[in-house]
Image (tube, rainbow, N blue to C red):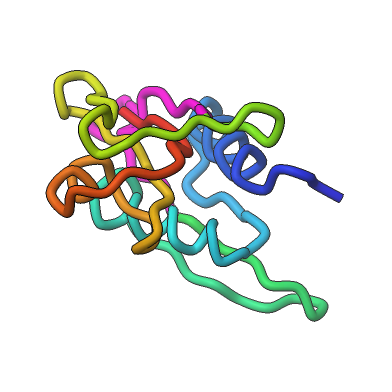
Amino acid sequence: MVNDTISDMLTRIRNANMVKHQIVQIPATKMSLAIASILKEEGFIEDFESYVENQKKYLLMSLKYIGKTRNPVICKIKRISKPGLRVYSNSKELPRVLDDLGIAIISTSKGVMTNLKAKELGIGGEILCHIW
């Protein structure tokens, strides 16, 4: 039983990137589906699909690499808000990741989105992770 499904998802992606795996399997939740769709939208992963095995839902995520040396597109992925210490930010103080070369994923009242979209809409929320 995993208490923090977001940290579990990020760790699985990080570990798969280190050993240059093409596909990673992640237990599916609403939050992991939202994060996966953002990662695909922003071009950090190739694609993802959900499937059911033994009455449990999973995500199969296809990771993205560059060139013949297969350098991962995701250089660093870091969890910010944790179950023991939640980190919130208003719209004026949303983080900038590498001068907007990377993204921060924010959980807002309007759903899960990137820091750039949240700033555009003028809403803040819980900062889930930074990716670059």
Nearest the viewer among 79 and 44 is 79
* Residue 80 x %, y %: 50, 27
Quarter of the image for residue 9 reads top right
The vertical placement of 71 against 40, above or below, is above
Taking the image as shown, residue 31 lies to the left or right of residue 47, namely right
The vertical placement of 70 against 6, above or below, is above
The vertical placement of 106 against 35, above or below, is above
The residue at the point 55 percent across, 38 percent down is 10
The residue at the point 43 percent across, 56 percent down is 36
User: Can I make out residue 128 in this image?
Assistant: yes
Nearest the viewer among 89 and 63 is 89
Nearest the viewer among 15 and 27 is 27
Quarter of the image for residue 4 reads top right
Taking the image as shown, residue 67 lies to the left or right of residue 124, namely left
> Is residue 130 found inside the magenta-colored segment of the image?
no
The residue at the point 48 percent across, 39 percent down is 128
Query: Which segment did they paint magenta?
Result: 62-80
Residue at the far top: name it: 98
Number of numbered tags placed on the structure image: 0
The vertical placement of 112 against 126, above or below, is below
* Residue 110 x %, y %: 34, 63
* Residue 62 x %, y %: 43, 54
Q: Quarter of the image for the C terminus: give it.
A: top left
Residue at the far right: name it: 1
User: Can I make out residue 68 in this image?
Assistant: no
* Residue 34 x %, y %: 44, 61
The residue at the point 31 percent across, 25 percent down is 69
